[in-house]
Image (cartoon, rainbow, N blue to C red):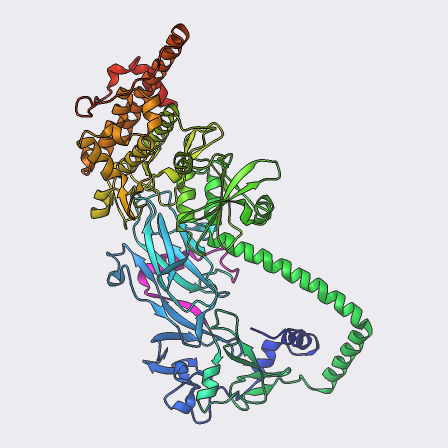
Amino acid sequence: MIPQFTIFHIIILIIISPISPPQAYAQLEDVIIAQNGCNSTCGEISIPFPFGMNEPHCYAHKWFEIECKSNTPYLKSLNLEVTDFNDYYSGLVQIMNPIYRSNCRHNKTSSNDNKTVTINLRDSPFVYSQGENTFLAVGCNNLAFLQSNGTKIGGCVSICDDENNNNFDVGSDGCNGRYCCKTSLPSHLSEFNATLEVLREDSSNGCSYALIASDYWISLDNSYMDYLEVETLNELKNMEYAPALLEWEILNDMLINSTFQLPSDPICYDSNVTSLSNRTTGRQCRCSLGYTGNPYVSGGCTEIPGFFDKNNRSKKWAIVGVSSSLGSIGLLIGLWFLHKDMKKRMIKKRKEKFFKRNGGLLLKQRMSSGEVNVDRTALFTLKDLKKATENFNKNRVLGKGGQGTVYKGMLVDGKIVAVKKFKVEGKVEEFINEFVVLSQINNRNVVKLLGCCLETEIPLLVYEFIPNGNLFEYLHDQNEDIPMTWDMRLRIATEIAGALFYLHSIASQPIYHRDVKSTNILLDEKYRAKLADFGTSRIISIEATHLTTVVQGTFGYLDPEYFHTSQFTEKSDVYSFGVVLAELLTGKKPIFSVGSGEFQNLASYFIQCIEDNMLFDIIDKRVIKEGEKEHITAVANLAYRCLELNGRKRPTMKEVTLELEGIRVLNKKLNVQQNHEEIELAGIEEYQHWDGFSASNSLPFVDSQTYSTDSEVMHIIALK
C-alpha cells in the first residue's frame, strides 16, 4: 500500500530531473542491498535484505531466510523456489508455484496428476498478490475451481469445440473460455489448491491444467492477458511450476520479538498486506524523495545523481511558486475531480473483475456463438436489478433456499421478474451449472431463465416471475377461496411428470434434476406447474446410465438406492416424483408428525398403508370426495411403483406421463358426463362413501386401451 504523497513525489521527480529514473539508477554504483558481511547473491540472483542467507543477522526473520540450493534460492520455511525479488521498494517476490493437472497420465509429469499439495502461507508475511496474479485453467470442457481452506472461492469454465485436446490454439481469442479460462484472485489469499472437474460426462477432455501465475509471465506484451502466448500454454505439459508473485511486509511481531529494527532515514508506513480485516499488520518502507536503493538496510538509500543540483532546485521552487499561485480552491477542485474519476474507475474495475470471476466472458462467448439463445437470455446490469428490487430490500424476498435468496423485482419496462442472489461468495459452481442447464431447456413447465448479472461479487440469475408460490405452501396451507381440487392435483402431477419426461428423454442431452420436491414446483397465475431450481442438476451423455456424485438431496425425497450407492440415475428423479405424488394424494408433508414428538417418513408410510389394504385411510378427504376411486387407485398404484426401493423396477418418466395423461383424459370425460347427469337428475346425491373398500381388491393399471385413442394421448405428450 503506497502513501498518496509518494505518487506526487514521483511525478515531481520525473518533471524536474534531467535524468530519467532508469538512467539515474544505472549511474548508481555500490548500492547496499544486504547487511554488512552477508552474502547477497545466489547464482545470478541478488538477495536484498530483509531476505538473507546463512547467519541469522543476515535476514530479518526466519520467514525471510533464503537457502541456496545448487545456485537456486528458496524460501527455506516454505520450500518455494525464488526467481526474482523485483525492485527493493515493490514489496514483491516472484516464486515458482505448482501447476495442478488432471488426466495427464501419459505426460512426463504423470506422477503429479491430480496433485493434492496445498500451498499454505498462513501466519507468514506473504500473500498471493491479487493485482499481479491470475487463476488460469487450460483444457477441454472443464470446471476449474480455486479452493482455500476447503471452500471454493473462485472458478471458471473452459470448453473445446473440436477433438484437439493436446494443443491449445487460443489464437487471438485470449483466455476467454475456449481452451482456456481465467479469473481474478480474492484479496489476501494465503492458502490454496485447485481442482478440475468434468463439465459433461460425454465430453472428451484430455490433459487439463489449473494454476495461479504472474500476469507478466502469461501476457504477450505486458497487455495484462489480452493475448496469451500459445507456446506458453502448450509448454504446460512439460512444466511442474509457473512463476507467481507474493506480496510481503515486515510483520509487527517481527519488530517486537526480534533484534531487527527498521532504519530511521527512509519513509516507513503502516501496511495491511496480510490482514483480512484491513487492520494494520506490519510496516513497509521506501526511500525519501530523491533517493533510491534498499530502504530496509541502514545506508541503503542512495541519492539519485543530479537530483539535488542547483538547476533542479530552481526548477523545484518555480513549480512550488506556480502551484501556490493557483490557490487552495483550485487544488480542492482538482482533488475533487480526481476523487470522482478514481472512484468511477475503481467501480468499473471492480465490476469487470466480478464479471470475469463469475464466468462473464464465457457466457458472452456462448451468446455470440449461438449456443445460448440471445432472444431468451440477456445480461442485466447491477444498476437495473438494484432498481428493480429496491436495492434488494428484505420486503422483496420471495424465499430462501440452500443456494441463495430470491427477490421479486420490476424492470424499467414494467416486467415482473424473480432475481436469485447466490448465497456463498466465490462459489460459482451452482450459478454456472444452473445457467448452462436452463439455457438448453425450452419447456412450458420449466421456469424460464431470462438472464443474469455478473457485475456483483455474488452472481445473480433473473427468471420469469411465478406469482402463486410453490406447491408445498399451496398444498399444506390450503386456501379455501382457491382450494386444491382433485382436478388441479391431477393436472399438476401430469405437468411435472411431462417436464421430467422432457428433461430425461426429449432434451438434446439428458438432464437429471436431482432435487425434485414440492417446494421446487412453482404455480403461475393460472396455477400451472413450473419446475424450478436447477442448481444441482446435471447434463449427462446419452450413453450414460448413472452419475456418481457426493450424495445431495432433501430428506424425505431422497432416493434410498442413491443414498447407499452414490449413483444417481433417472430413476432417482422418479422416486422423488413418487413422493410428490404421495403428497398430492394424502395432503401430508414428506416428513410429518405422528404425535408425541415423533415424525414419520411419508414414502415408507404410504407404501405400508397400501400393503396393509389401508389406502383410503390416508387419502386426503377432498380427494376422496371429488375423485373416482378407480382414478385415485390408479394414481396411488403409480406412486407405489415410483417408490420401489429397487430402481430398476420403477417406471420411466415417459411411462409415468403416459399413465397420468390417460387418467386425466378419463377424468375429464367423467366430469363432462357427471355435469350432464346433474343437469338431468338435479337433486340426486352425487357422492357415496366407499366403506369397506380394500386396496387389494382393485389396484388397476391404466393402459393405452383406457384412453380415447393412442394418437390423442401422444399428441398431448408432444405438446409438452
Quarter of the image with the C terminus in it: top left
Numbered range of the magenta stretch: 222-246
Q: Is residue 540 above or below residue 105?
A: above
Q: Can residue 545 be seen by looking at this rendering? A: no
Q: Residue at the location (23% across, 39% down)?
A: 604
> Which sits in the foreground, 661 or 30?
661
Which quadrant would residue 583 be assigned to in this image? top left
Instruction: Give the farthest residue toward the top.
Output: 680
Q: Is residue 551 above or below residue 27?
A: above
Image position of 541 (left or right of 178): left
Q: Position of residue 55 (x, y in %)?
A: 38, 91
Q: Is residue 150 above or below residue 498?
A: below
Q: Is residue 652 magenta?
A: no
Instruction: Give the farthest residue toward the right.
Output: 325
Image position of 627 (left or right of 306): left
Which quadrant would residue 649 be assigned to in this image? top left
Q: Position of residue 503 (x, y in %)?
A: 34, 34
Q: Residue at the location (42% across, 60% down)?
A: 135
